[in-house]
Image: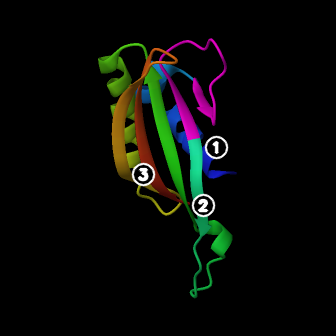
Amino acid sequence: MTHLQAVRDVLVASPEVSALVGTRIYPSVAPQGVARPFVVLTLASALPNHTHDGVPSELLEEARVQVDSYGEEYVATHAVATAVDDVLGALSGPIMSATRDSMRDGYEDATSLYRVSADYMVLR
């Protein structure tokens, strides 16, 4: 399972996130004409973690995942980003953890949508 699929699975399973976007969480690009708000996940980078304690390195991979929340209203878009941040920030288990590295917002003239973009370091 990829980092993007793992993050998507966690977000879709969250009642807080799914109440806002349902299953509209897409890898790399959202389909044209999709209902708003929605989330796009992008793998920015991935690095395997090397270990000397006998744990296979494929079980410990770190990736930077960019999570973009899109919406037609500023407040609603931030509500989605906050729900995502709450869910990913609560991950701290041995199977998967996530730490937010940065967050920024803006407005895209080409799509007439607000966007909140956050980068997470995901270890799984």
Q: Residue at x 35, y 33 (%)?
A: 105
Label 1 residue SS: helix
| Residue at which label 3 appears | 91
What secondary structure is marked by label 3? loop
Instruction: Work out whether 35 lies above or below 50.
Output: above
Cα separation between marks 1 and 2? 14 Å
- N-terminal of the pair, mark 3 or mark 2, is 2
Rendered residue at 48%/34% (across/down): 68
Task: State the mark number for residue 5.
Answer: 1
Q: Which residue is mark 2?
A: 46
Q: CA distance from mark 3 to mark 2?
A: 18 Å
**Amino acid type assigned to the residue bearing label 2 in the image:** Ala
Determine whether the residue tagged by mark 2 lies in a helix, strand or loop: strand
Q: Residue furthest bottom?
A: 52
Dot 3: few (<14), some (14–19), or many (≥20) neighbours within 10 Å? some
Residue 52, relative to residue 33: is it above or below?
below
Nearer-N-terminus badge (1/2): 1
Q: Main secondary structure of the magenta part?
A: loop
Please state which amino acid type lies under the numbered disc 1. Gln
Residue in the image at 53% along x and 20% along y: 22
Cβ atoms at labels 3 and 1 below 8 Å apart: no
Q: Is residue 8 left or right of residue 109?
A: right
Tell me if mark 2 has few (under 14), some (14-19) or many (20+) residues whose alpha carbon lies within 10 angstroms of its own.
Answer: some
Q: Picture coordinates of residue 87 (x, y %)? A: 40, 40
Magenta residues, as a range? 24-41
The Cα–Cα distance between marks 3 and 1, rounded to whole angstroms, is: 15 Å
